[in-house]
Every structure is written in structure tokens, then in C-alpha cells.
Image: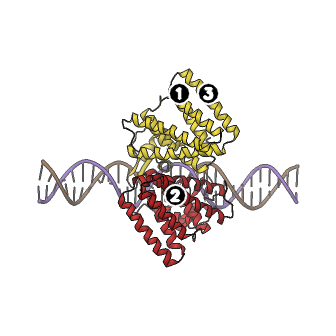
Chain colours: A red, B yellow, C brown, D purple
Amino acid sequence: MSEVQTLADKVFQEMTTAIVRGEIKPGTKLSEQALVERYGGSRAPIREAIQKLEARSLVVRVPNAGARVISLSLAELKDIYEVRLELESMACRLAAERMTDEEIAQLYTLLLEHKKNIKADSGLSYYQKAGDLDFHYRIIQGSKNARLQQMLGGELYHLVRMYRYQTSTNKARPEQAYTEHYRIVEAIEARDSELAELLMRRHIQKSINNLEKQLGNAPSA
Amino acid sequence: MSEVQTLADKVFQEMTTAIVRGEIKPGTKLSEQALVERYGGSRAPIREAIQKLEARSLVVRVPNAGARVISLSLAELKDIYEVRLELESMACRLAAERMTDEEIAQLYTLLLEHKKNIKADSGLSYYQKAGDLDFHYRIIQGSKNARLQQMLGGELYHLVRMYRYQTSTNKARPEQAYTEHYRIVEAIEARDSELAELLMRRHIQKSINNLEKQLGNAPSA
DNA sequence: AATGCTTACATTGTAGACAAAGCGTATGAG
DNA sequence: CTCATACGCTTTGTCTACAATGTAAGCATT
């Protein structure tokens, strides 16, 4: 995936995972000097890395005042999920129209593995979580829309992941999710794009409700 | 709007308009040295400006090889419009739910001005074009979703504008657009979010068809 | 003559120094 | 004692220099 990049890129990647995992907490001031000492190199590539993080909305930079790790309000988080809900539903609709038969077959294979993992772990989160990401990732790829892939994968993805880490929305309903995934794939196989979109919308809506419950807020609207 | 920024920001803004207007043509190599001579300053702020342009997908940068102004294929252009269609329809739905009565009243005022301009210009494009942007902009603001606003306004907006400039999709059907706008506002006023979304979807779809016609391609699918 | 290699040049990536803007603290006036 | 101002320090923005990489031209070899 990564072809040995420039130093700025490496720092960017390291910082991305650090922020997403919460190793650097939201709101933290990112001093360029401190980052130089931590990651090596000079300020030039560090600044580039920070700018890339800003482009992905992981940090906020204000002129002459420095950069801070983003700290999302509940409202902003809801906005993100609202957009994600729409775009992934759209992706699912397009996937139903555009995925090859082979890709659909591979989806079934993936689901089979998930089923195994659920039984083996009896509810453990790790595989299910990775599996969930994998499933959604393939649907998004199936949309065959590069811009859509870029938006969901590049920008929203990290923000969502970041707050999953921090709220540990992990161990959530693996069997139920599996069933929903299965129904979605069936709709895709039947080339029923409207149904596929609807099912994906409900599927994500459930996970949003789940998240809001964990945040101690009754689902609004 | 602009609070006297850093040099990098100024260069970024100038380059943005230059690219959008086609003064710098798609595919052009952006030599840092040349840009220094053109815009002043040193390479550091120039590089920052280029990186910001990259973040907005206006230029593509490859490591150790430099930056080029983006040159969209027809497929990529379709992808962008496909996403925009979905997001703006979504924005319209949300606007119907969330705009204040006052904001809706202002929409009517705006439409009134457009009507005047259409008569005065008898089909001239400038006001209508600016007016169209203004109309869509207000709907997007009305969604009250900051992330959505950012995506539509920050990223997709410039790309769309760029290709409007270059294909001169301008003088297109002002009266028809006005009527469609009016129906949309009526739906918003009635708080009929589903209808508002549908009407916006059709409205944009028409402009897409229009664009494809001008590009000499039959609308696909 | 065409292809592959070598070498020189141009351009980008990185480093470190300088300039300017913020921020905190301390000091003095009210 | 409180507030305002000024000073100094810290941090960011910018510039210049150097290193590394990509590109192209010229030469040699087949």
C-alpha cells in the first residue's frame, strides 16, 4: 500500500494513527518543536504533516497560534454521521448496480468468515469490528465512484474511527449486524438497488442509535 | 471574510481563482520556482499553498516529481456530479426541516430579484449564474449541517465551478431554472422535506443532463 | 540506427537560521 | 487590591542553503 514515501508522509501516517487511537487526545496543542523531537526530521516536513492532518479535519490550525487536535462537539459528531449515513446508503445503491458478480460472490465469502469468527469469539469485538470495516469498505469500493470512495474513505472514515476508539462502541451486536449484512448482500445480488440502499440506511441508523445511547443521549428527531 | 492572512493563504486564494477561471490550464506543471517568481515570497509559503490546493483536489502532487493542475476525465467529472447530486438533495431535505421561517422568507426575496434580472437581461447569463449559486448556497446553509456545508462548499464547489467556466454551461435556461427554484422553495415552506429533496434532485439532474449534452455525450444510464 | 547506460542539470525534499506575531508575567498606576 | 501596560520569551511564518531525487541529453555499445 505504501511505497516508501517522503518523511512528511511517514510522520503524517504515524500521527494519524496516534490521533485516531487517542494516544494524542482531542484538544491537545501540537507544538512543532515538540513534534520534531518526537518524530525526528526538521520543522519543514512536520509542518507538511500537520497540514495534511488539517486537510483531513483531524487537526485545526489557526494562523500564528498553532495547531490543535480536533475536539468534536456532539453536534459536529451528529453532522458527520448524518453525512456518512447518506453517502454510504448511496454507495450501497450504486454497488447494487455496478458490482460484478464476482465481487458479490466475494462478499458472500466474507460473510462466511464473519460467521465463523462470531462463533469462535462468541461475541468478542476485534474480529467483528475489523470485519465490519471490511464489509463496509467493499461496498464503498463497489460503488465504482472514486470521489465517493475518497470522501468516505479519506475524510469521514478517520473521524468515525476516532470516536469509535474513544467511546468503545465495539462489542456491539455482532449477530444482529451479521444478519443485516447478509440481507444487504442479498439485495445487491438481486440488483435491487433501492432495497439495498434502504437496508444499508437502516443498518447504519441502528449503529448511530447505538452510539447515541452510549453517549447518554436519547436519539434526537 | 478574509482577515489579512498569512502569505501562503493569499497565494492559495489567488491560485485558486486562477485555476478555477482556467487561467492556469488543467494539466499544467506547477514549478515552485516559477510560482515564486510569479507570486513573490519564497518556496515555503508557495509549497503550503500548493498543498492546500491539493487538499481541495485542484492539483495533484506526486512525490519528488512536482504538482500539476488537475485534469479530470469525463468519468471523474461524472463521479463528482453524482456525489453532488446526492449531497445537495440531502441538504434540501434538511433545509426543509431546519430553516427558520425568516430564512425561507429571504429565499422568496431572492427569487424576486432573480425574476427581475431575468427580465432585465432577457436571458443574459451573469446574474442568473451568480443567482443560481446564491440560491444553492442558501439551501446548503439551511441544512444546518456544518460538515455537509464544508464538503459541498469547500471541495466540490470549486471543481464544479472550474468546469462550468471551461464548458461555458452558462446561458442555460434561466426561466426554467427559476420555476424549479420556486417550486423548491414552496416545498420547503410547506416543510415537505421529501418533496423538497425530490425537486432538488430533479433540478440538478437536469443541469447535469444539460452539461452532458454540451460535452457531446448522451446521458448515460 | 537504435537501445541502454552514464553523467550533468533541474526540481523537489529537508534542514537550520532569521523575522514577526502571540502569550504570559511582572511591574506600576489607580 | 485590581487593572492596564510593557517587557521578554515562546511559537509560528518565512527565507536561504543543502541534500536527494527525477529528468534529459549525450555517449558508447550492439
Q: Earlier in the sequence, mark 3 or mark 1?
A: 3
Tag 1: residue type?
Glu
Name the residue at 42% across, 68% down: A110
Disc 3 with disc 1 on a shared chain = yes
Name the residue at 51% across, 70% down: A128
Q: Which residue is mark 2?
A: A199
Helix or strand or loop: what does disc 1 sit on? Answer: helix
Label pair 3/1, CB-CB below 8 angstroms? no
Disc 2 from disc 1: Cα separation? 39 Å
Choose between B23 and A208: the one closer to the eye.
A208
Disc 3 from disc 2: Cα separation? 43 Å
Please give the label number shown on residue B113. 3
Query: Is residue A197 in view from this perspective?
Result: yes
Name the residue at 53% across, 53% down: A55
Please give the label number shown on residue B175. 1
Helix or strand or loop: what does disc 3 sit on? Answer: helix
Label pair 3/2, CB-CB below 8 angstroms? no
Q: In this picture, is A45 found above or below A22?
A: above
